Image (tube, rainbow, N blue to C red):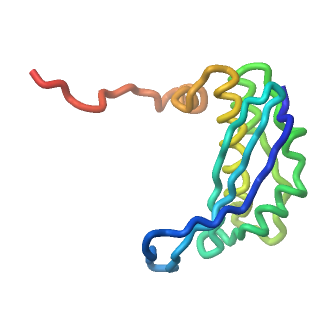
Amino acid sequence: MQPAGFTVSHVRIPLKRAIKHASHSRTHTDSLLACCRLPDGTTGYGEGLPRDYVTGETVDGALNLLKGSDIPGQLRATDWKQAVAAAEALNLRPVPGDHRGIQGNAARCAVELAWLDACGKAFGQGVDSLVPLLAPKCTKRLPLCATAR
């Protein structure tokens, strides 16, 4: 299985009030919304948040990066484990001057989440199954609340 279609859009979401912190103040959030459609029509969604004041990423830069990267050609799976491995192995083209290796993270995040959401639906797996696959030593189930006695 490979994606039958992939779209990524810029979505500007107004905030109810301004958000302020040490490096920035904003009244809206600019997000990347990715949609992955599988051949059977199953659809998955993912979001990425480029922040130029944090990582140097911009919405336009992220969209251009995705246009220049062969995303659908890298994503193939016949089961859930292969879908997760494909997401882990996903490569975007290098960003010139990105010495920290972080530009493209927002674009990658949106694409990976959309792919995993679609494949999770197709293979009957939830996000909760990712940790045992990716970090088995970190898997420990704890009760969410204590039971009353």
Q: Is residue 7 left or right of residue 33?
A: right
Q: Is residue 129 above or below residue 100?
A: above
Residue 30 in the image: above or below residue 119: below
Residue located 84% across and 40% down the image = 5
In the picture, residue 122 is in which quadrant?
top right
* Residue 40 position within the rendered picture, expressed as x and y whole percent measured from the top left: 80, 25
**Taking 57 as reference, is 146 above or below it?**
above
Q: Residue at coordinates 88% horizontally, 52% vertically from top-left? A: 69
Q: Quadrant of the C terminus?
A: top left
Q: Residue at 46% x, 28% y: name it.
A: 139
Give coordinates of residue 142: x percent, y percent. Answer: 33, 28
Q: Is residue 13 left or right of residue 72?
A: left
Q: Which residue is at a point 13% across and 25% down the rendered structure image?
A: 148
Q: Position of residue 45 (x, y in %)?
A: 67, 43
Decide: is 66 above or below 100: above
Which image quadrant for residue 62?
bottom right
Residue 64 horizontal/vertical position (percent) = 84, 63
Total label count? Answer: 0
> Closer to the camera, 5 or 53?
5
Depth check: give the residue in front, 7 or 84.
7
Q: Residue furthest left?
A: 149
Please state, as top left, top right, bottom left or bottom right, where the N terminus lies in the image: top right
